Image (spheres, rainbow, N blue to C red):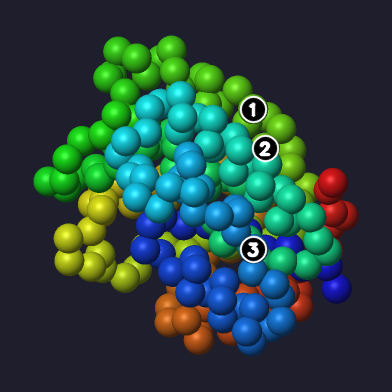
Amino acid sequence: MAVRIALLGAYGSGKTTLAAAIERELGIPAVQAAGPMRVDLDDEGEQVHEWSPTQLIGLTVARYADRRVAENRETFVSDGSVLHEFVYAALRLRDGSYPGTARRPDRAQLAPADLPAVLPLLWAPFPAVRRYADQAYTLLVHLPAEVPLAADPPIDDDFRARTDAVLTDLCADLGRPVHVVTGTVEQRLDHIARLVETTPQRGATT
């Protein structure tokens, strides 16, 4: 059975934990964009707050391509999905790496006056992303941020709420049902298993 799940949710919502549980318990391979989010994959010391807006936009498009390669299979669970790459970058350009925290600002955060000129460059490829997401995923699953942030988090709760709001709007634009899955990992896994059994299959994209 072809099952292609997109796990959607803000930082700390449990996407990676649930993806690993789905792979382990349901046998559905978990996929991510290839490699860590660094401009130079050979530079272990590279810090995200050192990126420029141009680097962030270029890396986002590259990671979209990486994720499509990783998802080129009949069955998978995507930890984040192609939608998440663009939502993260857009909010990052607006709010910086560590919104709502006392951590240092970074180069990728745009001045408000620059946002109208730069953000369209980020969203320019999004019609293709939207078509891909609509065709590729058989299940869109939203994980609300139910777990409180740990001490000294890189973001605040307001940023998590904005991330969820943008993801919700994008999914509404797809015109596809989004299944909200809550509770413990075991409860979420049980919910996912029932969805896998009852959701009609859709053709894969290439």
Q: Which residue is drawn at 87% across and 55% down?
A: 203
Look at discs 1 and 3 and give the one toward the viewer: 3
Q: Earlier in the sequence, mark 3 or mark 2?
A: 3
Residue placed most toward the observer, 188 or 67: 67
Q: Residue at x 56, y 81 (%)?
A: 21
Q: Which residue is drawn at 30% across and 39% down?
A: 49
Report whether 103 appears left or right of 37.
left
Residue type, numbered disc 2: Val
Q: Give the x, y percent position of residue 51.
A: 37, 33
Helix or strand or loop: what does disc 3 sit on? strand
Quarter assignment of residue 198: bottom right
In the picture of the structure, the residue carrying the numbered disc 2 is: 129
In the picture of the structure, the residue carrying the numbered disc 3 is: 31
Quarter assignment of residue 23: bottom right
Q: Contact, CB < 8 Å: mark 1 with mark 2?
A: yes
Residue located farthest toward the front when viewing the structure as drawn: 42
In the picture of the structure, the residue carrying the numbered disc 1 is: 125
Helix or strand or loop: what does disc 2 sit on? helix
Q: Is residue 149 above or below residue 60?
A: below
Picture mark count: 3
Marks 1 and 2 sit apart, C-alpha to C-alpha, by 7 Å
